[in-house]
Image (spheres, helix red, strand yellow):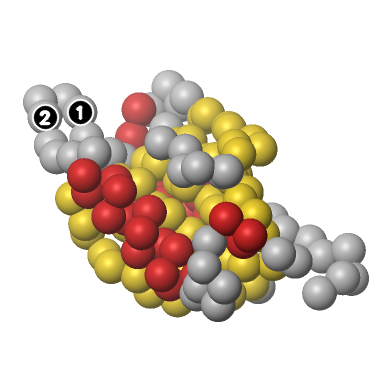
């Protein structure tokens, strides 16, 4: 699900022999010019969460602050309704930087696995610019 103006920059899929360890990570970007002036990251994540709810996902955790690789993001976690032998959680994490909103979408079997992926597979380094 891409929003108007949003672009998927990276999509990483990890298929493990142990299915419970599978995950995907997407990095998306959108210009803040596409949104009302002064829109907060919390409002952005809430609107993404509401759109995912319309697509059939259920909210597990509403918007909350979280640090990823030392940077302050706003996150929300949703889950796909369980079906036999199928189910996943999707974490949405966004930050506004340099006129853009950058989002990480992490999909995994459960929220614990999402947190493991965020702490081990996601590394953000700054080039010194704000």
The residue pinned by badge 1 equals 86
- The x and y percentages for residue 61 are 26, 65
Tell me whether circle 2 and circle 1 mark residues in contact (CB < 8 Å): yes
- The x and y percentages for residue 78 are 27, 52
Evaluate whether residue 112 shows in this view: no
100 left or right of 41 in image: right
45 left or right of 8 in image: left
* Helix, strand or loop under label 1: loop
User: Badge 2, how many Cα within 10 Å: few under 14, some, many 20+?
Assistant: few
- The x and y percentages for residue 20 are 33, 35
Q: Residue at x 29, y 46 (%)?
A: 52
* Helix, strand or loop under label 2: loop
Q: Residue at x 22, y 59 (%)?
A: 60
Q: Residue at x 36, y 59 (%)?
A: 47
The residues bearing labels 2 and 1 have C-alpha atoms spaced at a distance of: 5 Å
The residue pinned by badge 2 equals 83
Quarter of the image with the N terminus in it:
top left
Quarter of the image with the C terminus in it:
bottom right
Q: Nearer the viewer, residue 102 or 22?
A: 102
Q: Nearer the viewer, residue 120 or 36?
A: 36
Res. 124 image quadrant: bottom right
User: Badge 1, how many Cα within 10 Å: few under 14, some, many 20+?
Assistant: few
């Amino acid at each position: 699900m891409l929003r108007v103006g949003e672009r998927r920059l990276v999509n990483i899929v990890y298929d493990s022999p142990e299915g419970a360890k599978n995950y995907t990570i997407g990095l998306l970007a959108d210009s803040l010019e596409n949104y009302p002036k002064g829109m907060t990251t919390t409002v952005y994540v809430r609107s993404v969460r509401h759109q995912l709810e319309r697509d059939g996902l259920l909210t597990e955790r509403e918007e909350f602050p979280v640090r990823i690789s030392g940077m302050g993001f706003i996150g929300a976690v949703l889950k796909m309704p369980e079906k036999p032998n199928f189910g996943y959680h999707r974490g949405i994490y966004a930050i506004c930087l340099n006129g853009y909103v950058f989002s990480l979408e992490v999909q995994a079997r459960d929220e614990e696995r999402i947190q493991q992926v965020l702490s081990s597979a996601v590394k953000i380094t700054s080039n010194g610019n704000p």
